[in-house]
């Protein structure tokens, strides 16, 4: 589902992560995350973490998206990600899984998990 991929990528963007209205639109109020580090987050703690972020020239690269329908209103989005710094150096390779739920007329991220993985070839955007 293209809308889920677009929304997932939006959550990687600093300007979106700093916009409370966008965060409230994209994240479900009962959002939970298990980060790549193994740390757990809920809606409030992830919002606080995003608010504390500094602008950066680094970016998140994501690829190999796969969407699996669990129910008509519940989708599992799988993909790979890596951090690319301002010099083009790549690190923090991870496999990602996100559960998106349809709440009324919009999709919201309810659960996200990142798992460290081995390096993979970065596909050009």
Image (spheres, grey):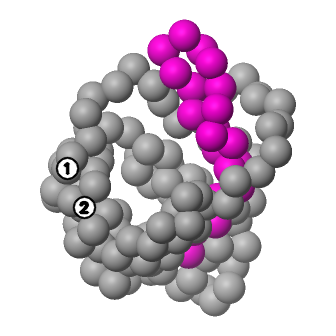
Q: Are marks 2 and 1 in contact (CB under 8 Å)?
A: yes
Q: CA–CA distance between discs 2 and 1?
A: 6 Å
Say which element carries label 1.
Answer: helix
Magenta highlight on residue 83? yes
Q: Residues within 10 Å of mark 1 (few under 14, many from 20)?
A: some
At x 23%, y 72%, the residue is: 44
- Please provide percent x and percent y for residue 21: 17, 58
* Residue most extreme to the left: 20
Check the image and report above or below for 36 versus 75.
above
Left or right: residue 19 compared with residue 31: left
- Which of 21/59 is in front? 59
* Residue most extreme to the bottom: 71
Q: Residues within 10 Å of mark 2 (few under 14, many from 20)?
A: some
Q: Quadrant of the C terminus?
A: top right
Magenta highlight: main SS: strand
- Please provide percent x and percent y for residue 54: 25, 33
- Please provide percent x and percent y for residue 69: 69, 79
Tag 1 residue: 51
Tag 2 residue: 47
- Which of 13/54 is in front? 54
Report the magenta residues as a range.
80-100
Magenta highlight on residue 19? no
């Amino acid at each position: 589902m293209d809308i889920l991929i677009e929304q997932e990528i939006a959550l990687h963007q600093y300007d979106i992560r700093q916009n409370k209205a966008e965060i409230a639109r994209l994240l479900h109020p009962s959002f939970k995350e298990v980060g790549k580090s193994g740390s757990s987050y809920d809606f409030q703690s992830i919002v606080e973490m995003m608010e504390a972020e500094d602008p950066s020239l680094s970016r998140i690269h994501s690829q190999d998206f796969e969407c699996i329908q669990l129910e008509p209103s519940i989708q599992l989005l799988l993909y790979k990600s890596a951090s690319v710094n301002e010099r083009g150096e790549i690190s923090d390779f991870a496999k990602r899984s996100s559960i998106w739920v349809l709440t009324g007329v919009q999709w919201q991220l309810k659960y996200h998990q990142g798992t460290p993985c081995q390096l993979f070839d970065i596909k050009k955007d």
